[in-house]
Image: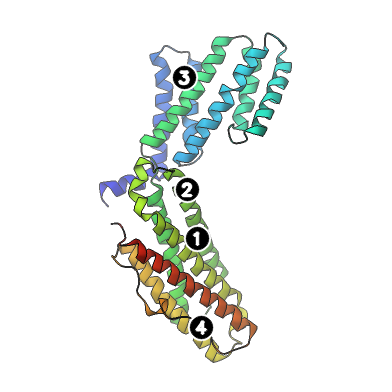
Amino acid sequence: MNPGTRLSALSISQEGRFVKLLIALLVGYSLPALWNASPGIAETMASSAWLTLGLGPSVESSKKYFLQRSMANLVPIPIGLVLYPLVPEPLAIIVLVSLAMFVLVKHFPNAFRLTSMGIAICLVAGFGRDLAAAEGRMFAVFFGMLIGFLVELFVLPPDQGYKFHLLARRASRQLGALFESVAATRSLDSLTAECLDSLTRAQLALRDQLANFKADYGPRGRRHLRRYAAEMALFEHRVALIGSGAHLLRTLADCRALFETLEPTFREHVFVHLARIDEVHQQLAAYFEHRRAEPPDHDYLQAPYTPADSANPYHMVLQGALMTHQRVLGERVAAIRALGALPA
């Protein structure tokens, strides 16, 4: 494992996250001391810096929390200070500021974090006309959140592309193992609920990770993820291929109870196709895993599916699943081939 790979692995690990949390906490607590600020300012800034990193290992989640919590403090506190000369009663101020914030949240639902806003509204009543305390709170929260976001962005930013490859490898191995078992044993007994549930979890985790990668990558590509620019289309194809294979296996498992009652010739027809599908998936796994220059070129991808001669409705269900997966394999591999060589 080279140094770059070690850093990528550390960036998505719990250990790397603890390192960033500690850095954010220390920086957030130490900076106010340079300005001789009060301990309360230091504590607020340090906790805000920590919280920015605490909601998930993602640059986008840190950015979202930074913006939402900052707005939840920068807006209600000034509103409360403006109202105090007119309505000096703290309880009335809480009600009025809450109503004003509810109107703003209705029009800008994604701009504020409700939990943080409730804390800020209650602090308005405690500050009274103490402008210095209000300014200190707004300053500490905003710059504390900014510190946490900058730590997430520049100190071991999570390598979502590396994590995608890890999850894709796990899902691909689970899928390949099931196809190989079915093809080798010529039986559907290996398609147990436990194995399929595990495959489904791996497939969903991979799909969610692709969404996380796209969110962190952003419209222009964040610095630490730009090296995956050429692979983004491959990520999409890999998720689709694993999803289609998993769907075929679940369809087979649903028909397992009736499968043994079908004609032997049709069962043989299914296993012949599954054996060839297994070969294609093994080639795909090798292509992605070992960075081969060319994607699979199996004859199964070019030959149109030939249905077996049967009017049994269960035959139609199984043949439809086989035909659909063959079509997905052919289309996705052709699209991958059109992209050119896989990036090293």
Q: Position of residue 155 (x, y in %)?
A: 36, 35
Instruction: Write down the quadrant of residue 320 in the picture.
Output: bottom right
The mark found on residue 212 in the picture is 2
Q: Which residue is mark 3?
A: 42
Residue in view at x 47 percent, y 75 percent: 326
Q: Residues within 10 Å of mark 2 (few under 14, many from 20)?
A: some
Total numbered labels: 4
Nearest the eye: 324 or 113: 324
| Pointer 4 or 1: first along the chain | 1
Mark 2: amino acid: Asn
Instruction: Measure the alpha-carbon separation of dots 4 and 1.
Output: 24 Å
Residue in view at x 47 percent, y 31 percent: 50
Mark 1: amino acid: Gln
Residue in view at x 35 percent, y 51 percent: 228
Nearest the eye: 301 or 204: 301
Q: Closer to the observer: label 4 or label 3?
A: 4
Q: Position of residue 41 (x, y in %)?
A: 49, 17
| Pointer 3 or 2: first along the chain | 3
The mark found on residue 203 in the picture is 1
Q: Residues within 10 Å of mark 3 (few under 14, many from 20)?
A: many
Mark 4: amino acid: Val
Mark 3: amino acid: Ala
Outermost residue toward the left in this view: 2
Q: Which residue is mark 4?
A: 270
| Pointer 1 or 3: first along the chain | 3
